[in-house]
Amino acid sequence: PAATPARAAGRPAVAGRWSVTPDAAERSEEDTARLLRLALSRTRVLCRETLERDPVGVRWSEAYGLLSRMEWRGEVDRGVFVSGLSGPQFAAPGAGVELAGERGEESPVLLGTCDPANLCGEAYPIVRPNGDRYSVRRLPGNYLVFRAGAPILGVEAHGARLVPLVDLDAVERRSAFSLLAGLVRHAGQRAAVRVETWDGTAVGDTSAAEDLASVGFIREDRTMILYRDFGTSR
Protein backbone atom coordinates (compact mmCIF):
# COMPACT_ATOMS: atom_id res chain seq x y z
CA PRO A 1 0.00 0.00 0.00
CA ALA A 2 0.94 3.64 -0.26
CA ALA A 3 3.38 4.96 2.31
CA THR A 4 1.83 5.74 5.67
CA PRO A 5 3.14 8.20 8.29
CA ALA A 6 4.48 5.26 10.28
CA ARG A 7 6.44 3.97 7.29
CA ALA A 8 7.63 7.44 6.41
CA ALA A 9 9.09 7.64 9.91
CA GLY A 10 10.97 4.40 9.32
CA ARG A 11 8.72 2.23 11.49
CA PRO A 12 6.91 -0.86 10.20
CA ALA A 13 3.12 -0.69 9.94
CA VAL A 14 2.87 -3.96 11.92
CA ALA A 15 5.27 -5.78 14.17
CA GLY A 16 5.73 -9.30 15.46
CA ARG A 17 6.50 -12.76 14.15
CA TRP A 18 4.04 -14.28 11.73
CA SER A 19 3.59 -17.69 10.13
CA VAL A 20 0.91 -19.29 7.98
CA THR A 21 -0.83 -22.25 9.60
CA PRO A 22 -3.12 -24.71 7.83
CA ASP A 23 -6.83 -24.62 8.62
CA ALA A 24 -8.40 -27.40 10.67
CA ALA A 25 -9.33 -29.52 7.65
CA GLU A 26 -5.73 -29.64 6.44
CA ARG A 27 -3.92 -29.98 9.78
CA SER A 28 -2.30 -33.22 10.86
CA GLU A 29 -2.63 -34.37 14.46
CA GLU A 30 1.02 -33.45 15.06
CA ASP A 31 0.37 -29.94 13.69
CA THR A 32 -2.53 -29.54 16.12
CA ALA A 33 -0.48 -30.94 19.00
CA ARG A 34 2.29 -28.45 18.24
CA LEU A 35 -0.21 -25.58 18.38
CA LEU A 36 -1.61 -26.86 21.69
CA ARG A 37 1.90 -27.07 23.15
CA LEU A 38 2.43 -23.47 22.07
CA ALA A 39 -0.79 -22.43 23.82
CA LEU A 40 0.25 -24.36 26.94
CA SER A 41 3.60 -22.59 26.99
CA ARG A 42 1.72 -19.29 27.29
CA THR A 43 -1.04 -20.06 29.78
CA ARG A 44 0.16 -23.31 31.45
CA VAL A 45 -3.49 -24.43 31.73
CA LEU A 46 -5.85 -25.13 28.84
CA CYS A 47 -9.63 -25.38 29.00
CA ARG A 48 -12.48 -24.15 26.84
CA GLU A 49 -12.13 -20.50 27.97
CA THR A 50 -8.36 -20.22 27.64
CA LEU A 51 -8.29 -21.92 24.25
CA GLU A 52 -11.03 -19.67 22.88
CA ARG A 53 -8.89 -16.64 23.85
CA ASP A 54 -5.68 -18.04 22.35
CA PRO A 55 -4.90 -17.09 18.73
CA VAL A 56 -3.61 -20.54 17.71
CA GLY A 57 -6.96 -21.18 16.04
CA VAL A 58 -7.76 -24.61 17.52
CA ARG A 59 -11.35 -25.22 18.61
CA TRP A 60 -12.05 -26.96 21.91
CA SER A 61 -14.04 -29.67 20.12
CA GLU A 62 -10.93 -30.40 18.06
CA ALA A 63 -8.52 -30.13 20.99
CA TYR A 64 -10.29 -32.21 23.65
CA GLY A 65 -9.68 -35.66 22.17
CA LEU A 66 -6.07 -34.87 21.33
CA LEU A 67 -5.40 -33.45 24.81
CA SER A 68 -6.85 -36.65 26.28
CA ARG A 69 -4.44 -38.72 24.21
CA MET A 70 -1.58 -36.41 25.23
CA GLU A 71 -2.58 -37.11 28.84
CA TRP A 72 -2.37 -40.84 28.28
CA ARG A 73 1.14 -40.33 26.89
CA GLY A 74 2.11 -38.31 29.99
CA GLU A 75 2.56 -35.05 28.07
CA VAL A 76 -0.11 -33.11 30.03
CA ASP A 77 -1.93 -33.43 33.34
CA ARG A 78 -5.73 -33.47 33.66
CA GLY A 79 -7.69 -31.99 36.56
CA VAL A 80 -9.39 -28.84 37.80
CA PHE A 81 -6.49 -26.47 38.46
CA VAL A 82 -8.20 -23.06 38.37
CA SER A 83 -11.53 -22.41 40.05
CA GLY A 84 -14.05 -20.47 37.99
CA LEU A 85 -12.99 -22.07 34.71
CA SER A 86 -14.82 -24.98 33.11
CA GLY A 87 -13.53 -28.54 33.39
CA PRO A 88 -11.84 -30.64 32.42
CA GLN A 89 -8.61 -28.67 32.37
CA PHE A 90 -5.26 -29.76 31.00
CA ALA A 91 -2.01 -28.41 32.39
CA ALA A 92 1.61 -28.55 31.40
CA PRO A 93 3.52 -31.07 33.55
CA GLY A 94 4.33 -29.51 36.90
CA ALA A 95 1.93 -26.58 36.50
CA GLY A 96 -0.40 -27.98 39.16
CA VAL A 97 2.43 -28.05 41.68
CA GLU A 98 3.37 -24.48 40.76
CA LEU A 99 -0.22 -23.29 41.25
CA ALA A 100 -0.52 -25.04 44.62
CA GLY A 101 2.79 -23.71 45.90
CA GLU A 102 3.19 -20.95 48.43
CA ARG A 103 3.32 -17.47 46.90
CA GLY A 104 5.99 -15.16 48.18
CA GLU A 105 6.01 -11.40 47.81
CA GLU A 106 5.38 -10.68 44.13
CA SER A 107 6.17 -7.55 42.16
CA PRO A 108 3.37 -6.14 39.98
CA VAL A 109 3.37 -6.85 36.24
CA LEU A 110 1.84 -4.97 33.30
CA LEU A 111 -0.20 -7.07 30.85
CA GLY A 112 -1.97 -5.91 27.69
CA THR A 113 -5.71 -6.46 27.61
CA CYS A 114 -5.31 -8.13 24.20
CA ASP A 115 -2.88 -10.71 25.58
CA PRO A 116 -4.37 -14.25 25.28
CA ALA A 117 -3.30 -14.96 28.87
CA ASN A 118 -5.55 -12.17 30.13
CA LEU A 119 -8.94 -13.68 30.98
CA CYS A 120 -10.14 -10.82 33.16
CA GLY A 121 -13.45 -9.33 32.12
CA GLU A 122 -14.60 -12.55 30.46
CA ALA A 123 -13.97 -15.64 32.56
CA TYR A 124 -13.17 -13.44 35.54
CA PRO A 125 -15.18 -10.24 36.00
CA ILE A 126 -13.47 -7.38 37.84
CA VAL A 127 -15.50 -5.76 40.62
CA ARG A 128 -14.13 -2.55 42.13
CA PRO A 129 -14.31 -1.77 45.87
CA ASN A 130 -17.41 0.41 45.32
CA GLY A 131 -19.23 -2.57 43.80
CA ASP A 132 -19.06 -1.36 40.19
CA ARG A 133 -17.96 -3.84 37.56
CA TYR A 134 -14.92 -2.71 35.59
CA SER A 135 -15.32 -3.15 31.83
CA VAL A 136 -12.12 -4.48 30.24
CA ARG A 137 -11.81 -3.00 26.75
CA ARG A 138 -9.55 -5.21 24.65
CA LEU A 139 -7.82 -2.55 22.59
CA PRO A 140 -4.15 -1.84 21.84
CA GLY A 141 -2.93 0.68 24.39
CA ASN A 142 -5.06 -0.72 27.23
CA TYR A 143 -3.39 -2.67 30.03
CA LEU A 144 -3.97 -4.17 33.44
CA VAL A 145 -1.48 -4.19 36.27
CA PHE A 146 -1.52 -7.49 38.21
CA ARG A 147 -0.11 -8.30 41.62
CA ALA A 148 -0.04 -11.92 42.77
CA GLY A 149 -2.32 -12.79 39.87
CA ALA A 150 -5.05 -10.26 40.71
CA PRO A 151 -5.75 -7.06 38.73
CA ILE A 152 -5.07 -3.92 40.77
CA LEU A 153 -4.94 -1.10 38.20
CA GLY A 154 -6.54 -0.36 34.84
CA VAL A 155 -4.37 1.55 32.34
CA GLU A 156 -6.39 2.94 29.44
CA ALA A 157 -5.55 4.81 26.23
CA HIS A 158 -1.76 4.40 26.52
CA GLY A 159 -1.84 5.57 30.12
CA ALA A 160 -4.13 8.59 29.73
CA ARG A 161 -6.64 7.13 32.21
CA LEU A 162 -5.68 5.22 35.35
CA VAL A 163 -8.40 3.33 37.21
CA PRO A 164 -7.71 1.77 40.64
CA LEU A 165 -9.32 -1.68 40.83
CA VAL A 166 -8.55 -2.25 44.53
CA ASP A 167 -7.76 0.04 47.42
CA LEU A 168 -4.09 1.00 46.96
CA ASP A 169 -1.89 2.80 49.45
CA ALA A 170 0.86 5.20 48.33
CA VAL A 171 3.56 2.50 48.25
CA GLU A 172 1.40 0.19 46.14
CA ARG A 173 0.50 3.01 43.76
CA ARG A 174 4.14 3.93 43.22
CA SER A 175 5.07 0.31 42.56
CA ALA A 176 2.32 0.05 39.94
CA PHE A 177 3.07 3.47 38.41
CA SER A 178 6.73 2.56 37.94
CA LEU A 179 5.64 0.03 35.29
CA LEU A 180 4.34 2.82 33.05
CA ALA A 181 7.93 3.66 32.11
CA GLY A 182 7.91 0.44 30.09
CA LEU A 183 5.47 2.05 27.64
CA VAL A 184 8.10 4.58 26.50
CA ARG A 185 11.37 2.78 27.17
CA HIS A 186 12.18 1.45 23.70
CA ALA A 187 12.56 2.93 20.24
CA GLY A 188 9.36 2.62 18.23
CA GLN A 189 7.19 3.24 21.26
CA ARG A 190 5.51 6.51 22.11
CA ALA A 191 7.79 9.32 23.15
CA ALA A 192 5.81 10.02 26.32
CA VAL A 193 3.06 8.80 28.62
CA ARG A 194 0.60 11.50 29.61
CA VAL A 195 -1.71 10.64 32.52
CA GLU A 196 -4.85 12.76 32.41
CA THR A 197 -7.18 11.21 34.98
CA TRP A 198 -7.00 9.13 38.15
CA ASP A 199 -10.28 7.37 38.92
CA GLY A 200 -12.17 9.84 36.69
CA THR A 201 -10.67 13.00 38.25
CA ALA A 202 -7.96 15.20 36.72
CA VAL A 203 -4.81 13.57 38.05
CA GLY A 204 -3.21 16.89 38.97
CA ASP A 205 -5.99 17.41 41.52
CA THR A 206 -5.39 14.08 43.30
CA SER A 207 -2.82 12.59 45.64
CA ALA A 208 -1.81 10.21 42.83
CA ALA A 209 0.10 13.13 41.25
CA GLU A 210 2.69 12.97 44.04
CA ASP A 211 3.11 9.24 43.56
CA LEU A 212 3.58 9.69 39.81
CA ALA A 213 6.14 12.41 40.44
CA SER A 214 8.07 10.02 42.70
CA VAL A 215 8.64 7.66 39.74
CA GLY A 216 9.70 10.33 37.24
CA PHE A 217 6.55 12.03 35.98
CA ILE A 218 6.43 15.82 35.78
CA ARG A 219 3.40 18.09 36.02
CA GLU A 220 1.99 19.80 32.93
CA ASP A 221 -1.08 21.83 33.83
CA ARG A 222 -3.45 19.27 35.43
CA THR A 223 -1.77 16.24 33.82
CA MET A 224 1.36 14.25 34.64
CA ILE A 225 3.76 13.28 31.87
CA LEU A 226 6.76 10.97 31.57
CA TYR A 227 9.11 11.50 28.61
CA ARG A 228 11.38 8.82 27.23
CA ASP A 229 15.05 9.28 27.98
CA PHE A 230 16.30 9.30 24.39
CA GLY A 231 19.87 9.27 25.58
CA THR A 232 19.55 5.73 26.93
CA SER A 233 16.75 4.21 24.82
CA ARG A 234 17.47 1.22 22.62
Image (cartoon, helix red, strand yellow):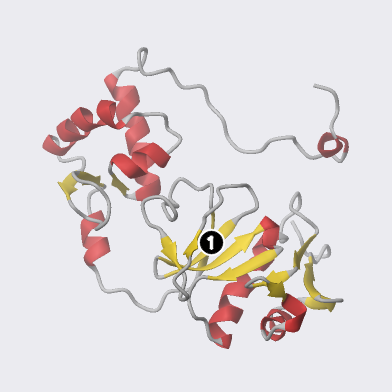
Q: Position of residue 43 (x, y in %)?
A: 37, 49
Would residue 176 be found to the left or right of residue 36 on screen? right
Q: Position of residue 131 (x, y in %)?
A: 44, 71
As drawn, the residue found furthest toward the front would be 131
Q: Is residue 26 above or below residue 176?
A: above
Q: Which residue is mark 1?
A: 144
Seen from the viewer's position, the closer of residues 158 and 32 is 158
Please give the name of the residue rendered at 72% of the width and 56% of the height, measured from the top-left corner: 186
Query: What x and y, as percent, mark residue 95?
Result: 26, 55
Give the camera-side residue of 93 and 179: 179
Q: Residue at x 34, y 30 (%)?
A: 34
Q: Is residue 222 above or below residue 121?
A: below
Q: Amino acid at mark 1?
A: Leu
The C terminus lies in quadrant: bottom right
Q: Which quadrant of the figure contains the N terminus? A: top right
x 83%, y 62%: residue: 230
**Helix, strand or loop under label 1:** strand
Q: Position of residue 39 (x, y in %)?
A: 37, 40
